């Protein structure tokens, strides 16, 4: 069964600190993995995309890693800001269908305190 | 900022009412999707469309229906709303590429539906 598991479920950090969010998946055949940021009451917005051959990608203060062998990904946030408070969702796409089916994790709810 | 819009953003209605959630995109994307999301849970695909006059049911069974008469418009209708339909509904779209599965889905802001 194709699944995406994220940890921790929630996280509270102080402004300026770093944090790392984890994602494990069993989706096969694998196409790509995206990290989305979802602000409260808004739709998800893509932060990074990684394909099978990529093992790290950065977008400003966000750095994603991918280990396709162990089927694990992480999202590292550097020097957190209050605006980073959101749900971060790991989304894995398979290449076994013309739809490009997406498998969503439940997200990590990050709260940044001043 | 993605050009995909949903209305209304919030809706509170009584049981038995018929409702239509609107979704429009101005990016010319062929594929469109409806997801249902409950607090703390993953998004579940309830409907999708490959293009005009194409509609398919997703993974999660839903009593809602959709239509795709125009490329840019993908409304979702509930004929008789019930409290169990209370949820957040997210619309998304993506373009069709000839190869690979890297098509990003762009999401609308969502409609928060509450059925009393």
Image (cartoon, grey):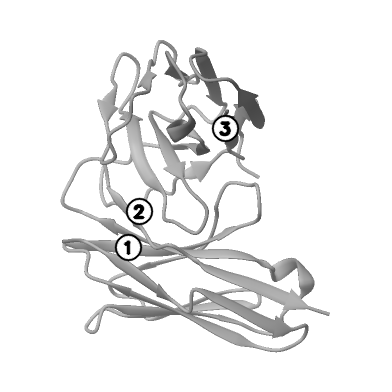
Image quadrant of residue A52?
Answer: bottom left
Q: Position of residue A8 (x, y in %)?
A: 48, 79
- Residue at disc 1, secondary structure: strand
The residue shown at (76%, 86%) is A16
Q: Label 3 lies in what chain?
A: B
Residue at 35% across, 16% down: B52
- Give whichever of A48, B63 is nearer the camera: B63
| Residue B106 appears in the rendering | yes
Residue A107 at x, y percent in the picture: 48, 65
In this view, A67 is above or below B90: below
Q: Chain of mark 2?
A: B
Have a look at marks 2 and 3 and say if they share a chain. yes
Quarter of the rendering occupied by the N terminus of chain A: bottom left
Which residue is identified by label 3?
B113
Q: How many marks?
A: 3
Q: Is residue B51 above or below residue A95?
A: above
Give me the disc on residue B102.
Answer: 2
Q: Nearer the viewer, residue B48 or B20?
A: B20
Mark 1 Cα within 10 Å, few/some/many (few <14, many 20+)? Answer: many
Task: Please determine whether, in this image, residue B1 is positioned above or below residue A76.
Answer: above
Q: Quadrant of the C terminus of chain A?
A: bottom right
Q: Which residue is mark 1?
A: A32
Q: Residue at x 34, y 31 (%)?
A: B47
* Chain of the residue under the numbered disc 1 shown in the image: A
Q: Point out which mark residue B59 bears.
A: none
Question: Which comes before the other along the chain, label 2 or label 3?
Answer: 2
Secondary structure of residue under mark 3? strand
């Amino acid at each position: 069964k194709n699944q995406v598991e994220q940890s921790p479920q929630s996280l509270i950090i102080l402004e300026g600190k770093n944090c790392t969010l984890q994602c494990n998946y069993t989706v096969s055949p694998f196409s790509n993995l995206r990290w989305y940021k979802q602000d409260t009451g808004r739709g998800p917005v893509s932060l990074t995309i990684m394909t099978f051959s990529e093992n790290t990608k950065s977008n400003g203060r966000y750095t994603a890693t991918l280990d396709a062998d162990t089927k694990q990904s992480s999202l590292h946030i550097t020097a957190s800001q209050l605006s980073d408070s959101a749900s971060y969702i790991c989304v894995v796409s398979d290449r076994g269908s013309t739809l490009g089916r997406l498998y969503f994790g439940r997200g990590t709810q990050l709260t940044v305190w001043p | 900022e993605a050009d995909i819009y949903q209305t209304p953003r919030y809706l509170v209605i009584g049981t038995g009412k018929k409702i239509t959630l609107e979704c429009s995109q101005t990016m010319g994307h062929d594929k469109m999707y409806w997801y249902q999301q409950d607090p703390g849970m993953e998004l579940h695909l309830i409907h999708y469309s490959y293009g005009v006059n194409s509609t398919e049911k997703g993974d999660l069974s839903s009593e809602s229906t959709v239509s795709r008469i125009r490329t840019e418009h993908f409304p979702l209708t509930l004929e008789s709303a019930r409290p169990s339909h209370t949820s957040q509904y997210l619309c998304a779209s993506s373009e069709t590429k000839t190869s690979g599965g890297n098509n990003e889905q762009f999401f609308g802001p969502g409609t928060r539906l509450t059925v009393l």
